[in-house]
Image: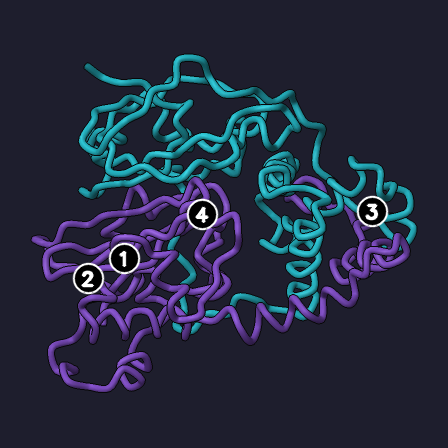
């Protein structure tokens, strides 16, 4: 570990530390290398924001689905074949309106509905966002490019338990009548987190 | 524990290093580190609360200087050592250098007596507890009053679950706080919602 007062050059590089634990788990018969292949594929090809975007697009075009989604997010996303880990026992969908804006965070670590939003972006896990978004919410969002009008109520959701959150952005007026597929293409990961509006 | 990980509301941090389309991973080893910890949880070598707590038990200077996936890997390796699966010596020999691990754990605690069931609209206060082991109450809500918005299904109680202490599962409540109550005269106006375990809450009459 390196601090201004103390440089320890004997600490092994990260790559070698990962190799070490992976090899030892393999030797214990725990098939770590096989699992790395499978889980890396899931993380990079399946757990992507396009899943959350599909949910949002469906909610925009199908009022009955929207109602089910707001009542029980976990059940509703399962209708689209989207799974959540067992320990995420509840999904709360946070509906933005012209007068309410929602944004999610995890001040204690990095919790997210990662199967729907994707594994969180670097800034979400970084110290600055975690420290400041709950206390300086409007300022932080402005710094990130989202300047909310003063009359919009801001709601920050800190993911401190195993309930997960997903922001349902407001549909841009000019996209009314678009197909579900085309609408899904509009919905960015950052809008699902709530640091952007569409 | 009142660790360095409990960042909500801490001052002195800078501008969020935000980019559009920011990546989740920056290097191939990060993808492997993430997969290895997920595999260990899936195998039942440890649970998510143990995993989170081992990150919190990292030396504070190490925590602050480590990247996200270094923290993840440090937790995985620490728990594998603590569970007797591997030794630190083996890890360091293989890694050809020092392999910093998390500090020892303090004891956990079970659910609190006199837990109450709350309903949306109930006014509640977060108990002013100081906990040596794992806890999912961010420090910024300690002792603060808020309003219950909703109730979740029951989850394992983290203060126990991270320590192998027997406990009942309990619900969490989404509690709405006013930023002005959390940091008087020192915050942007917002409603801050926190998922609070039942044991952490008491009713305000």
Instruction: Give the letter of the chain under mark 3.
Output: B
- Mark 1 vs mark 4: give the one in front: 4
Q: Are marks 2 and 3 on the same chain?
A: no
Instruction: Give the letter of the chain under mark 1.
Output: A
Q: Which residue is mark 2?
A: A147
Residue visible at 64% across and 59% down?
B34
Snapshot quadrant of residue B165: top right
Q: Residue furthest left?
A: A151
Snapshot quadrant of residue B17: bottom left
Spatial distance from mark 1 to mark 4, Cα to Cα?
29 Å
Question: Can you give x and y, in whole percent of width and height, for residue A4 in the image?
Answer: 64, 44
Residue contact at pointers 2 and 1, CB within 8 angstroms: yes
Shown colour of chain A = purple
Spatial distance from mark 2 to mark 4, Cα to Cα?
33 Å
Q: In the structure shown, which secondary structural element does the residue marked by tag 1 occupy? A: helix
Shown colour of chain B = cyan
The N terminus of chain B lies in quadrant: top right
Residue visible at 64% across and 50% down?
B72
Q: Which residue is mark 4?
A: A89
Disc number placed over residue B98 in the picture, else none:
3
Q: In the structure shown, which secondary structural element does the residue marked by tag 2 occupy? A: loop
Which mark sits nearer the N-terminus, 1 or 4?
4
Q: Which residue is mark 1?
A: A141
Q: Are marks 3 and 4 on the same chain?
A: no
Q: Is residue A140 visible?
A: no
Residue contact at pointers 2 and 3, CB within 8 angstroms: no
Say few, some or many: other residues with alpha carbon within 10 Å of mark 1 (under 14 / 14 to 19 / 20 or more): some
Residue visible at 87% across and 54% down?
A24
């Amino acid at each position: 570990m390196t601090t201004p007062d103390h440089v320890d050059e004997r600490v092994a590089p990260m790559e070698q530390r990962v190799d070490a634990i992976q090899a030892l788990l393999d030797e214990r018969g725990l098939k770590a290398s096989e699992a790395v292949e499978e889980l890396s594929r899931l993380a990079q090809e399946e757990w992507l924001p396009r899943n959350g975007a599909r949910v949002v697009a469906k909610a925009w075009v199908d009022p009955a689905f929207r109602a089910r989604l707001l009542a029980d997010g976990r059940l509703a996303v399962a209708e689209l074949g989207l799974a959540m880990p067992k320990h995420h026992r509840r999904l709360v969908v946070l509906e933005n309106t012209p007068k309410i804006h929602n944004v999610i965070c995890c001040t204690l670590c990095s919790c997210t509905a990662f199967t729907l939003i994707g594994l969180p972006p670097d800034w979400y896990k970084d110290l600055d966002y975690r420290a400041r978004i709950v206390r300086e919410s409007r300022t932080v969002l402005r710094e990130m490019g989202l300047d909310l009008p003063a009359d919009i109520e801001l709601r920050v959701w800190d993911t401190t338990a195993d309930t997960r959150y997903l922001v349902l952005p407001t549909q841009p007026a000019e996209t009314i009548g678009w197909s579900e597929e085309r609408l899904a293409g509009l919905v960015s990961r950052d809008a699902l987190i709530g640091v952007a509006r569409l | 524990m009142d660790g360095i990980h409990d960042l909500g509301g801490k001052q002195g941090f800078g501008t969020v290093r935000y980019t559009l389309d920011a990546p989740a991973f920056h290097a191939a080893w990060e993808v492997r580190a993430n997969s290895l910890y997920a595999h260990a949880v899936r195998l039942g070598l440890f649970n998510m609360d143990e995993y989170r707590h081992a990150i919190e038990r990292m030396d504070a200077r190490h925590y602050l200087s480590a990247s996200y996936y270094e923290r993840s890997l440090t937790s995985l390796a620490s728990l594998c050592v603590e569970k007797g699966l591997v030794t630190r010596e083996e890890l360091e020999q293989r890694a050809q250098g020092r392999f910093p691990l998390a500090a020892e754990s303090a004891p956990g605690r079970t659910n609190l007596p006199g837990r109450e069931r709350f309903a949306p609209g109930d006014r509640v206060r977060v108990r002013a507890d100081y906990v040596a082991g794992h806890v999912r109450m961010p420090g910024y809500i300690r002792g603060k009053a808020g309003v219950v918005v909703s109730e979740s299904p029951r989850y394992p109680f983290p203060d126990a679950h991270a320590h192998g202490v027997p406990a009942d599962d309990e619900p969490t409540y989404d509690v709405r706080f006013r930023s002005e109550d959390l940091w008087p005269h020192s915050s942007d106006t917002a409603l801050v919602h926190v998922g609070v375990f039942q044991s952490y809450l008491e009713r305000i009459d």
